[in-house]
Amino acid sequence: MHLWIHAALPAVLLAGSVVYVLLSLLAVFRYRRQRVPVPSAAPNGTPISVLKPLHGIDEGLEENLRGFFAQPYRHADGAPAFELLFATRDAEDPAIAVVEALRREFPEVPVSRLVTGEPPYPNAKVYSLALMVDAARHDLLVMADSDVRVDAGFLETLSAEFSDPALGLATCPYRAVAGTSVWSFLEALHMNTEFLGGVLTARMLEGVRFALGPTIAIRRGVLGEIGGFAELREYLAEDFVMGQRAAAHGYRVILSRYVIEHRIGSQDLAHSLAHRLRWARSTRRSRPAGYFGELFLRPLGLAVLLTAAAPAAWPVLPATLLLRYLQADAMRRTVQARFGWKHWLLLPAQDMLSFAIWLAGFFGSTILWRGHRYRLEADGRFTRIP
């Protein structure tokens, strides 16, 4: 009897987590039922400025950038209906050579390069984006990280979605592609199953009131109305805040039907854990209640706790694992992620690692980012530690 009393809390939490998993499966169905917009011909669509901050040579950078140069989004006369803007911190950044090689390969594509110098505030990415917005010629702005890869339908799909005048911001879900390390493999597994489930469930229950960092499209006027990048410069999760403020100003915010490819590279254990812990600590400060609610994203960890408290409840472990496999399969189909036997074999290990990282996110207020240490404030802002 005493053991079952101790098992009551994990049992209740696990029941809540099972409900969440079922909701996430419904959320997948709702997202897939969303109408796929008919791509607009460029003469009827909106000219687009694509903004890409660069910092060194990411794994697969040339192919990542090539997809943007090769976009078939054209005017009636065949000229590109888009421009590409690239920003680096200094003129010696090796990424510049990659841009110039592609520029020679696609001479018809309008390209601008900016050298930003050292950022005057913590978020260097926001500083680069602010300078590129000032230099951009068009009103529809698409911000895409250097590790994003797209195919030919990318800009056409976004243009079709923005044919709705009420739409202020669109953010793209992503299929995470791992590098060669097992740690990047586990991180990609987390993104393609667990994280995506949380995104789709939030979309179904409360609407899209956030944005995902790798790719965001926003109207210039909306960006100005929410305060521009001057209001985002001290936030670590500037993407989340951007989507939150656009929704708060009454604009429609959507999860696009276009799924990008997020190439996360081959991180070792230290870099992968630092990245995931930075993400966890940032999320805890950006949306504290939501972060606590992420406990329900982790049914396997709760099943382990219940079994530890009441060993006789061990049948919940295989049942929970089966349910988690069903959820993971639904998520990976949504973003067309390729799964092999290693994915299914390592999913329990990833879930337990994710549970541990979530717990660690409650502790500490410092993060490591691009070789510098920062302190996170309670409201999601961050400052560099000298």
Image (cartoon, grey):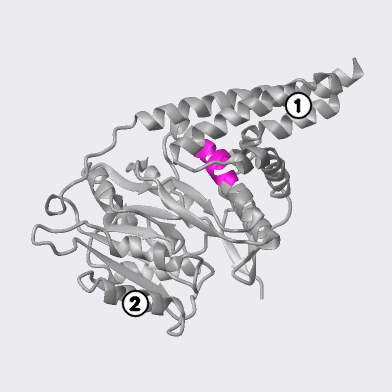
**Residue shown at the point (44%, 64%) measured from the top left:** 146
Q: Are marks 1 and 2 in contact (CB under 8 Å)?
A: no
**Residue shown at the point (43%, 41%) measured from the top left:** 209
Q: Amino acid at mark 2?
A: Ala
Q: Which residues are magenta?
A: 189-199
**Residue shown at the point (44%, 65%) measured from the top left:** 126
- Judge by depth and name the residue closer to the eye, 286 or 105: 105
Taking the image as shown, residue 230 lies to the left or right of residue 78, namely: right
List the single residue furthest toward the right: 2
The residue to which callout 2 is attached is 101
Whole-Å distance between the Cαs marked 1 and 2?
57 Å
- Is the residue 40 above or below the residue 333 in the image? below
List the single residue furthest toward the top: 1
Q: Estimate how packed mark 2 is, as few (under 14), some (14 to 19) or many (20 or more) residues with alpha carbons within 10 Å.
A: few
Q: Main secondary structure of the magenta part?
A: helix
Element on which disc 2 rests? helix
- Judge by depth and name the residue closer to the eye, 283 or 299: 299
Quadrant housing the C terminus: bottom right
The residue to which callout 1 is attached is 10
Residue 282: image location, x then y, percent: 60, 53
